[in-house]
Amino acid sequence: MQLAAALDEAGGDPGLRLAGLVGLARVHRARYARDGDPAALEAAADAYARARRLIPRDGLAYGELLPEWGETLLDRARAEGGRPFASAAVRVLRESRAAVPRSDPRAGPRLLRLAVGLRLRHTYEGDLVDLREAEYLLELAVRHGPHPMDRARAWRDHGDVQLEIHAHTHAPDRLDRAADSYRRAWRAALEPDDATSDPAALELAALAQQLRAEVLERLSRPRAALDAYRTALTLLSRLPTSDTGPLRARVQALEAAL
């Protein structure tokens, strides 16, 4: 491989070795995207780890390397046999979050990724502490997120976490919180002036309302659920490639039952 040869030629030059290792990691990630072999992600993570040792903590490259490394570990943790990599992903994503101040525009997405890592580790370990930390991080992401879509994603994930906590505690208020979080996600997604012509915003808003409707059904509030389903259907109908059949069927079933 040419990059491996370049690393040998770089010798003791840390700048060249850093560039070579990051390039090598990206090649391995591309291999995984092409072939789906988890070993490629492990090779990428190893290259990032070696690159990390060449960067001082106050170096600009330090803060830029960590999100890529953390995302690679997240992908590996999601793949077959990924359980041993979940804690490593959380560790690197936690470091990535700490590398930028809360006022930095990059802080919100890093908070979201760390929350994803904690939730993934929870699926393996079942530790409620991970969910509570994810909940806190998502609330931070909402407060400090400058972009409505980032806040919408954080509120959607916050709603998901409420349901995951409810599965542990069975506390009814968690369902109420989930419904409220999904409502906030819907409103945030439609906040930008161009939201009604943005497929990503429409899709997220529709999903948030559909998830909210499902929770409202669990709360035995069928009329409110029907309103939320109808809103989701209206939003999805604006997307030419969306499949509205299942949602339309649910609306018709609720209408018939009321």
Image (cartoon, helix red, strand yellow):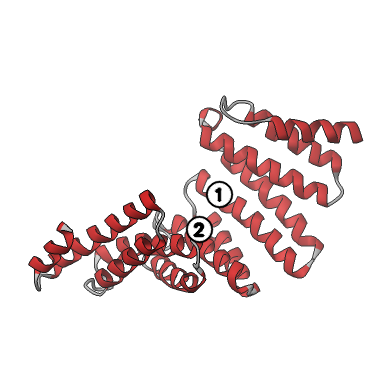
Q: Secondary structure at mark 2?
A: helix
Residue 191, image quadrant: top right
Would you say residue 258 is visible in this rendering?
A: no
- Between 47 and 143, the residue placed more toward the observer is 47
Q: Which residue is mark 1?
A: 153
Q: Residues within 10 Å of mark 2 (few under 14, many from 20)?
A: many
Instruction: State the residue at coordinates (56%, 29%).
Output: 196
Would you say residue 27 is visible in this rendering?
A: yes
What amino acid does circle 2 point to? Answer: Leu
Q: Is residue 136 above or below residue 195?
A: below
What amino acid does circle 1 point to? Answer: Arg
* Disc assigned to residue 144: none
The percent coordinates of residue 57 (x first, y second) are 28, 73
Answer with left or right where residue 122 lies relative to residue 50.
right
- Between 72 and 236, the residue placed more toward the observer is 72
Instruction: State the residue at coordinates (78%, 61%).
Output: 173
Distance between mark 2 and mark 1 Cα atoms: 8 Å
Quarter of the N terminus within the rendering: bottom left
Answer with left or right where residue 142 lies relative to residue 33.
right
Q: Is residue 174 above or below residue 216?
A: below
Q: Secondary structure at mark 1?
A: helix
Answer with left or right where residue 10 lies relative to residue 137.
left
Quarter of the C terminus within the rendering: top right
* Disc assigned to residue 112: 2
